[in-house]
Image (tube, helix red, strand yellow):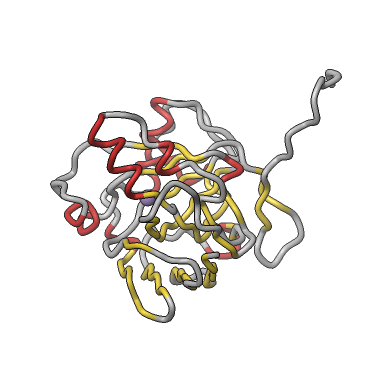
Amino acid sequence: MPDYVIETPPVTALPVANENGAFPVRRVYCIGRNYAAHAVEMGHDPDREPPFFFQKNPNNLDTSGVFPYPPHTSDVHHEAELAVYLKSGGTNIPLDEALDHVYGYGLSLDMTRRDLQGEMKKMGRPWEIGKAFERSAPAGPVHPVAAVGHLAEGSITLKVNGVTKQEGDLNQMIWKVPEMISYLSEYFELAAGDVILSGTPAGVGPVSPGDIMELTVDGLDTLRVTVE
Ligand code: MN
């Protein structure tokens, strides 16, 4: 090991459900517009166009159950998403081998400063300021495939203060989990520790301090996050 000249940055790691141990995070990829009804609500054509991805930072993932309302925005939106956790990777991964690289699944929120994202879109600029801010990805524990299997269908629901805001089914994803893995691996070298947020169903909307968000996916538990 080299002698690091500054304090070593901590590794972000998520707890594994019902087991000891933690999942260390390497990269976070997020797909845009992966449910047709959400593409329509954002003003886009729901036809299957090539997928596109943006990234969050590993340490944007946060399992504290608290989402601090971020600065420089007055329009922070919830996006309920299934997170996919990889145990291995590579390049040019064939579709029929893609799921072999999945360690597990979990609940996550792709919190978005929608006003800033909108300004960046208008100017043709990158989205990070709208997407990759501190604690912008509240997440639950990682559920190993060995315990929950592969999740290709089942309801995904988000409630705010007990009122259902987002409702969809994992089978409505335009690009399925194996397709996302295979496609990403053509452009990037995937590896153990990579995370894919798989897109959000329709019904995204704003939250305010004091709100309680509850995300549920069939086969997993419920993630409860308080906006502060
Ligand atoms: Mn999203």
Number of disc labels: 0
Q: In the rendered view, does 205 fall on the left or right side of 149?
A: left
Residue 6 x, y percent position in the rendering: 80, 25
Residue 77 in which image quadrant: bottom left
Residue 215 x, y percent position in the rendering: 46, 69
Q: In the rendered view, does 68 fall on the left or right side of 36?
A: right
Residue 79 in which image quadrant: bottom left
Q: Residue at x 35, y 43 (%)?
A: 116
Q: In the rendered view, does 103 fall on the left or right side of 178?
A: right
Residue 178 x, y percent position in the rendering: 39, 45
Residue 57 x, y percent position in the rendering: 54, 38
Farthest residue to the bottom: give it. 162
Rendered position, 35 above or below 134: below
Q: Residue at x 67, y 58 (%)?
A: 16
In the picture, the quarter occupied by the C terminus is bottom right
Q: Residue at x 72, y 63 (%)?
A: 19
Q: Nearer the viewer, residue 45 or 123?
A: 123
Residue 78 in which image quadrant: bottom left
Rendered position, 69 above or below 92: below
Q: Residue at x 50, y 52 (%)?
A: 70
Q: Nearer the viewer, residue 10 or 113?
A: 113
Q: In the rendered view, does 143 fall on the left or right side of 108?
A: right
